[in-house]
Amino acid sequence: MSPLLLLVAILLLIIYIYHYAVSRPPNFPPGPVRLPVFGSYLQLLAGNYRYPYKIIDKMTSKYKSKILGFYLGSIPTIVACDFESIKEILVRPEFQGRFDSVVTRTRALGDRLGVFFVDGPYWAEQRRFALRHMRDFGFGRRSETLESQIEIEIRDIIDIMQGSRKDEKVHKNGLTYLPDVFYPGFINSILVVLMGIRFSRDEDEKLRFLGNKTMLFQRSGDTTGGFLTHIPWIRFFAPKLSGHHSNQISSYHLQKFMRELIEEHKTSYSEEYMRDFCDTYIRELKLQQASADITTFSDDQLLLTAIDFFFPAATAISTTLVQAIIYMMHYPEICSNVQKELDTVVGRNKLPSLNDRPSLPYTEATLRESMRRTTLTPISVPHRATEDTYFRGYFVPKNTMMITCLWSMHMDKDFWGDPEVFRPERFLDEKGLLKKKDYTLPFGAGKRLCAGETFARQNLFLFFAAMMQNFNFEMPDGKELPDINHQIPGIIESPYEFWVRAIPRL
Ligand code: HEM
Ligand SMILES: *[C@@H]1O[C@H](CO)[C@@H](O)[C@H](O)[C@H]1NC(C)=O
């Protein structure tokens, strides 16, 4: 080949690569260049492989825009980092799709099932059905029956932490193991709704095992699906590193546990009396199968719906509770303010209840601040644009990934002024009452709003208030406080497990 021809070939290649790198849909938001296969994913990871969303946040300064655009693998992606644009993504109907990926299929019998990762009319019908009927069993509203069940859990856990109920797996030498001590409480709390049962304390070990395995999925990757989304076959070569293995193990244990409960229900099912959500689903299934029409109801869908409500109840609430306790150790003054409020309003003779909740604004504000300062789901769960459309002047092609970077918004200097500071007062007015408008969105908003928000907030409040009422928390001698800026990454971010000294308050 003549040198000239070679030169031309190299030049053409460079031009091609350059074009590819900067190519993007017309009128797309600003953002980093694109590489083959990975898009801009590697740049994010290279910037901060544990917390790539912190690089996204840095890019908002670099590109002077709170809306960014780039490719994740071959998927055009728009990331919104401020309250207004996040809110807009969450409420617009054409942004309520989800992505199909090997990650979501691995946990859903190779199919698209459940509530989290499905979309369209299928999602709408199944989400609506679940929420409507779980309500009958106390989910998502005030229910004295459910609350009294939760209170039993809390009392038992307090007994374990005080040492009056022996359980050496989670309480030894005056130290309590977090979050494991809480798993059985939250698991029973959701099982009452889904399956009409709570396991006895003898089975705590089984529930903690399940909590541990559920957490494995939460830590198996980020919500974009990571490498598995861009190069799905990587799971065969790097099953552990890609998170695929954790996903499989976690799904195996969750499915096995749920299947047994569902089978029991089918055996003992009676049309006369609906014991729980599972029964109402079985009833609907029978009805739909009797009429020959195509239906979205199926055995597999029941299984995945139960799992989709079970796994965040087991992991997200306990993680958030432990996070709040960690903050109370970092800020003893705020902790004692919470305790003073509880002592004044509730006293020590009964556990704090949901009736007390409106009279405990400081406690509520402390929980809100904890969920703001540490965003459980930093990039939430990505949405999918279901048609070509426009967003804040930019063009959005169909199947764009729409990411709401809740972390950026919760840590937005322009909005909060001092986002790094832990200050519950930012949620209170001059009279010490909760401000009407809450500008945090830990649960998202709109049609995809976390389906468990009310349930999560109630459980969180009841457990946190009970912990503050009954204990002071300290690290064991010589152990450092967990670093609030150093979490285990994942779908949700979580602190490392640790032993804590829970000192009964006199
Ligand atoms: C502190 C605890 C929790 C936090 C911070 C949280 C946060 C979130 C977020 C950010 C989303 C995604 C919203 C979006 O797509 O824009 C979500 C979805 C969801 N959450 Fe939660 N969650 C929590 C607890 C729970 C609990 C306890 C349950 C069930 C009992 C639950 C069930 C769900 C379900 C089913 C979805 C999917 C909704 C859908 O796609 O339609 N979550 N959650
Ligand atoms: C689950 O249990 C294993 C074995 O005891 C432990 O190494 C791991 O850290 C636990 N994971 C979680 C999330 O608790």
Image: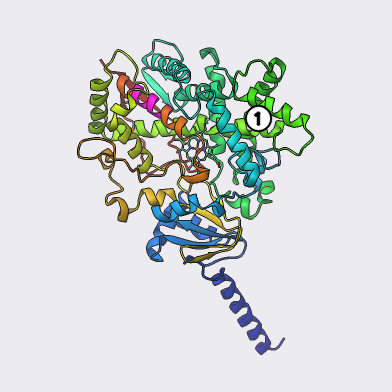
Residue 185, horizontal then vertical, whole percent: 47, 22
The residue drawn where x is 25% and y is 31% is: 332
Give the magenta range. 459-466
Q: Any magenta on residue 462?
A: yes
281 over 110 or under it: above or below? above
In the image: residue 502, left or right of residue 93: left
Residue that mark 1 sits on: 255
Counting from the top left corner in percent of width and height, residue 55 is at: 43, 56
The amino acid marked with disc number 1 is Gln
Position of the N terminus, as image quadrant, is bottom right
Residue 59 lies, in percent from the top left, at 42, 61
Q: Viewer-proximal residue, 181 or 104?
A: 104
User: In screen coordinates, is 280 left or right of 60?
Assistant: right
What residue is at 56 percent from the left and 55 percent from the top? 401
Q: Which residue is drawn at the image coordinates 31% and 19% (left, top)?
A: 470
Residue 162 in sight here? yes
The residue at the far right in this view is 292
Asked if residue 356 is among those painted magenta in the image, a careful observer would answer no
- The quadrant of the image that shows the C terminus is top left
In this view, the residue in front, 477 or 388, is 388
Q: Is residue 327 visible?
A: no
Q: Residues within 10 Å of mark 1 (few under 14, many from 20)?
A: some
Q: Indicate how the structure is coloured in the image.
A: rainbow
